[in-house]
Amino acid sequence: MTAVLTEAALRSGAEALNVELTDAQSAQLGNYGALLMKWSKVYNLTAVRDPGGILTHHLLDSMAVVPALRRELRKRGWEKVRLLDVGSGAGLPGAVIAILCPNVDVTCLDAVAKKIAFVQQVAAELKLPNLTGLHARIEAMTDPYEVVSSRAFASLGDFVGGSANALRPDGIWLAMKGRTPDEEIKNLPAGTEVFHVEQLVVPGLDAERCIVWLRKD
């Protein structure tokens, strides 16, 4: 890891989020952050490029959903699942989920080819067989997944409307948002139900964060 993106800082943040890291996962997350900084110098993958920002705004922000995701999978008795991360960009939160949840096969979907090339490079360099990058538009996806996720991708209505064909009938949507999007929830399309809005606290990030959990009604 870089001098600022230290293992100690990463482990401290993970501990605050109740995420236990193995040595291998800690190394993979650090290497992912380093790759993100390296590639962003050339390909403009993220506006956040300093190690401290990468840690809080990307790694820990994405890691914050992992305990909640694990809980929802346990509740349904799902041990091995497929997750589609829509508008994943450089693999956020998809790559972080793949590192921390070996039982989840993650497909990072984005319409920008260079971002998917980066995800594929991450999967190869970090030896993540459960991480795949897919260059496509969500509207073209019809293969059903148990979980469809997004991180500040679009309005909730556009997210669920565009990805409905990619979600299993009994599947769940995981939408990462800033503050609770009350207006977007009011304007959801028919046949969609919010079953939980979960507030998140990301260590070192002075901003509101939540997960909106949805399912087909």
Image (cartoon, rainbow, N blue to C red):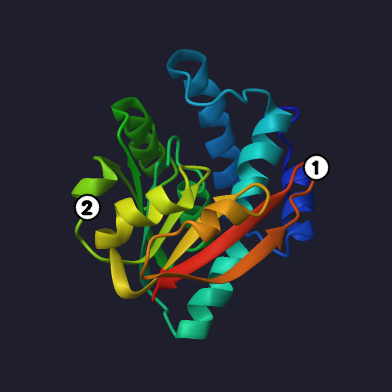
Q: Which mark lies nearer to you, 2 or 1?
A: 2
Amino acid at pointer 1: Gly
Rendered image quadrant of residue 77: bottom left
- Secondary structure found at label 1: loop
Residue drawn at 70 percent across, 31 percent down:
53
Marking on residue 24? none
User: Mark 1 or mark 2, which is nearer the start of the sequence?
Assistant: 2
Residue drawn at 25 percent across, 65 percent down:
144
| Residue 35 x %, y % | 51, 30
> Which residue was labeled with disc 2?
141
Residue 20 visible here: no
Tell me: 19 left or right of 69: right
Residue drawn at 62 percent across, 26 percent down:
48
Tell me: 125 left or right of 97: left
Around disc 1, counting alpha carbons within 10 Å, would you say few (fewer than 14), some (14 to 19), or many (20 or more)?
some
- Secondary structure found at label 2: loop
Amino acid at pointer 2: Met
| Residue 11 x %, y % | 74, 51
> Which residue was labeled with disc 1?
204
Q: Quadrant of the N terminus?
A: top right
